[in-house]
Image: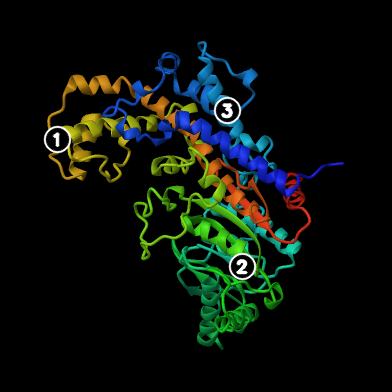
Amino acid sequence: MKRHRTSQESLERDKRHAASITRVLSIYGYITDSYIIEFFTDHLWESLPESWRVVLSDLPAPQLADQLLCNGNSAEVRYSSVWPLSLLALKVTAHSLAFQRTPRYEKISGLQKRPAEFQHNHSQSSRLDPLFRKHVKPKKQHEIRQLGKLVKKLCDSTSCADVVDVGSGQNGGTEATSIPFPKPPRHVLACVDPQAPWEDFVRQVASNAEETSLQSAGENKMADDTWRTLTNASTSHVTTSTEEVMNLKTTRENEAAEPSAGSCHVVSESRVDRRFLLTGLHACGDLSVAMLRHFARCPGVAGITSVACCYMKLTTLEVPQPPGVLSADSDIREFGYPMSSWVSRLSGHKLSYKSREVACHAIEDYIARLKGDSDILRTHCYRAMLETVIRKVDPTMRRPGVQTIKKAHRLPFTEYAMLGLERVGLDPNTPLDETSVEHMLSQQQNVVVFFSLALLLAPLVETLILLDRMIFLRERGFQCEVIPLFKPQFSARNLVLVAAKDISDLGDLLEETTASESAM
């Protein structure tokens, strides 16, 4: 018989896993912390061990993909030279510690970029109703179908008929297909504050539902039973029933007259008539974190499926307001990373903004470029070369944002430099040192190598962030797992964190869900 781990065993396993990753990153984290555009200005190539440089220097791109980034059968790898043990050990360790990215249902089709459902028609899923494919890109169709099945399975297991879909954007077209309700949703705009307690979220949901019901009465009677709150980056898209919302609202109003226990109100499970699930398909930055905290603290949330993205937008003690993230609350009480008390005490747990940004890259796409020896690989070298020119003209200008130069890899560097200098407000006719330019161009493959090393470590950063979230949940006694749900060549952020309350074994549920797909 299959033996299931106890909650404590799973917690200890995750802690050991996280500790192992921090030990690796404490040694080689400088690679993911580095900006590839500073390859020449900061002498990044020289920062690598000399023995690595000897074997990796000028290694052809296809061999680099096979020998470093591909996690296949090591016996089948053919090395062009003898690699140092430290490099081999890093490769094996990085692949073994990172969460598995290939879904169980992927077999022979795993070698193809497109999922099997798009083999006959590259833009229309053969396993999705035409109504659900309208105005939906293939990538999103694939995500909707896979996540929708998982949410439905979780709904059945937790006896929930209502789902709160968080961070879904304003068009609402894609998320409508992922919710297993026979009636159309209703759309309402609202903002979710990641720093707010779960009671505020429930009250917000209730008030928006009531307002929407009053405004829409008579327009669409079928929609009276279901409604949805939609938002962009920092907002929530909610689907649930009006009946549940009014029950939750009544609970919140009753609570207002009662004393609270500490900073978080405690509501009896019996006072929430109908429970609901939380789901988020690529909820950005702290929004995924807010979902997990609501799940852990709100008695009414029975389960959650969280597919995260934009890890660089997580708030941290070191970077409380990441670039591009606006916050009205400068007094952050709980940061997006780390979430768990254990990881926060772990030596070497800190993750830089850059390392979290690298963790968001589409690794499988880059491997495909390496294997095809694509000219696009030249782009990083060009941008690193441009950085040297920019700093020579203006030493105070560091890593300026350069508006995208279309088909940059097809241009001679002189033309690329003129366009780039103009985009950052510098003289496009600045003379270039031809000798220096030729020298840097000759190191193009070394730039590719350094970036590939960063991508080798990037999954460890993502895995550590997700382990921290799992430990946060396990510390509170909840079952949770992370599984690869989407085909990674099609959807780069394909890991889903699933947690549930009051079910016998979450692992069996997930195994059954993925097994049903592989049988198709």
Callout 1: helix, strand or loop? Answer: helix
80 w.r.t. 433: above or below? above
| Kind of residue at disc 1 | Val
Classify mark 2: residues with Cα within 10 Å, few (<14), some (14-19) or many (20+): many
Residue 268 place in picture, x, y as percent: 68, 74
Callout 3: helix, strand or loop? Answer: helix
Q: Is residue 456 visible?
A: yes
- Give the number of the disc on residue 93: 3
Classify mark 3: residues with Cα within 10 Å, few (<14), some (14-19) or many (20+): some
242 w.r.t. 347: above or below? below
| Kind of residue at disc 3 | Thr
Count the marks: 3
Of labels 1 and 2, the one closer to you: 2
Quick one: label 1 or label 2, which is nearer the N terminus? 2
Please give the name of the residue rendered at 59% of the width and 70% of the height, measured from the top-left corner. 239
Q: Which residue is mark 2?
A: 298
Please give the name of the residue rendered at 24% of the width and 30% of the height, measured from the top-left corner. 413
380 with respect to 119 (left or right): left
Query: Which residue is at the front of the view, 436 or 456?
Result: 456
- Give the number of the disc on residue 135: none
- Give the number of the disc on residue 393: 1
Residue 291: quarter of image: bottom right
What is the C-alpha distance between the residues marked 3 and 1?
A: 43 Å
Query: Which residue is at the front of the view, 405 or 338?
Result: 338
Please give the name of the residue rendered at 61% of the width and 49% of the height, measured from the top-left corner. 470
